[in-house]
Amino acid sequence: MGTVAIIGGGPAGLMAAEAAVTAGATVELYDAMPSVGRKFLLAGKGGLNLSHSEPMEPFLSRYGTRRALIEPAIRSFPPVALRAWARELGVETFVGTSGRIFPTDLKAAPLLRAWLRRLRQAGVRFYVRHRWRGWDGQGKLHFMTPDGASYVQADAVVLALGGGSWPHLGSDGAWVPFLSEQQVPIAPLKPANCGFDVRWSEHFRMKFSGCPVKTVQVVVKTVEGAVIRHMGEFVVTANGVEGGIIYTVSALVREVIATEGTATLWLDLVPDRSLQRLTEDLARPRGKRTIATHLKRRAGIMGVKMSLLREMAPQEVFADPARLATVLKSLPLKLVAPRPLKEAISTAGGVSFEALDTTLMFRSFPGMFCAGEMLDWEAPTGGYLLTGCLATGRLVGQAAAEWADAQCSHRV
């Protein structure tokens, strides 16, 4: 078998290494950081969400316009297979109430330690502090290391360098110029699963930054005019909004802003009550009670929700129960810009699938493959991102090993 060089030590790169070494290849993995899996560890800090348990059809729909292109990889390594893989590493998993799949201890570190131990025992060699700088004049991989330049020749290469979010963990998009110089089509990197800016008043910003808003229904109109509804919660930030439901609609909102300049989310602050019922409740006499007390008693509106209402609604609606109920069921929140890419959880854009064949090998670079977040796809949080990275990594690892073996056979 030949040698497979894998550049990038995130989930996609590590899974490519596992698939390639299992197929019999000699595997060398290179990463720019002092250790591998850094973004994986940080992403799992609040509970490692490995995948999602929903049926395959809705699961695949989460990949939007790129579904057909990423579907073969995911079908070859679906969530049930991912859970079996974790069990082989000694990590049991469970399905949470939301349908998300987690390790039983919720931690990323034990899984990563077991994974790296198995990879090393299988013969994978790791080279850290090796920053990829493209190719030299002879086509060898060029790395910069603490000891200077290093050049590597391999029978097959897997690029799994991540997107451009969280650059301090190594996913900095520095690979874009090297592939662009080789005329590889790359969609511009954009923030995905990201927060958005809102022009809060100074009072609201100072008092409510960091406060969660539970539970609301969010309505957003797509560029094409379709109406999308999601239930969940989000967090107010000093700059705007982020979290849960905001990440779910972030791709839609980002495209609306790109097309129209701003985007409006319509918030239903009382999603468990119909407009008619809410209007009747608010129309009840309030006597000497303040409007704030009346809203708290009749609609459960208080705290940050009450302040959102005062922040966004004109003062005159508070005197009219019917208008007030309408605003509570459809409060407009204007989003003016996505937060910077470096703050986003993940990246949209990347290497175009049109540049690759069905094994995710570059058409213009035989023997070089691409996996993970540097591909032009995106998905919401909830395990879909990690599943996509692991599945594409597994696919290209197997394909790279087969290619490397064929090169060795030709040399013989």
Image (cartoon, rainbow, N blue to C red):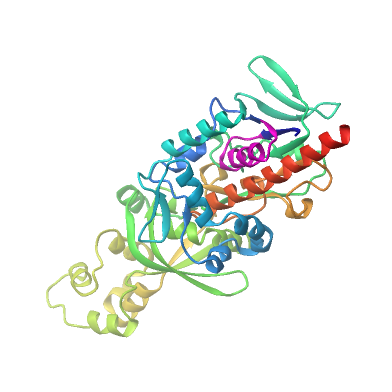
Q: Is residue 275 visible?
A: yes
Image position, residue 37 (x, y; %)? 52, 35
- Can you say whether 384 is above or below 124 in the image? below
Q: Residue at x 44, y 60 (%)?
A: 245
Q: Name the foreground residue: 119 vs 281.
A: 119
What are the residue bounds of the magenta stretch?
A: 7-27
Q: Is residue 260 placed above or below 226 in the rendered structure?
A: above
Percent from the top left, x then y, of residue 218?
43, 68
Q: Residue at x 61, y 50 (%)?
A: 190
Is there any visible trace of residue 261 in the rendered image?
Answer: no
Residue 146 is left or right of residue 90, and the answer is right
Answer whether residue 17 is magenta in the image: yes
* Residue 137 colored in magenta in the image: no
* Residue 249 x, y percent position in the rendering: 51, 62
Of residue 406 and residue 302, the one placed in the foreground of this image is 406
Residue 146 rendering spot, x and y as whole percentages: 63, 16
> Which quadrant does the N terminus fall into?
top right
Q: Of all residues shown, which one is farthest toward the top? A: 147
Image quadrant in which you'd find residue 60: bottom right
Q: Dividing the picture into quarters, in which one does residue 152 lie?
A: top right
Residue at screen point 69% across, 29% down: 132
Q: How many marks?
A: 0
| Image position of 352 with respect to 5: above or below | below
**Quadrant where the image shows the C terminus:** top right
Q: Which residue lies at the image location 61% right of the left edge and 69% below the top edge?
A: 223
Q: Compare residues 169 and 340 and report the one nearer the observer.
A: 169
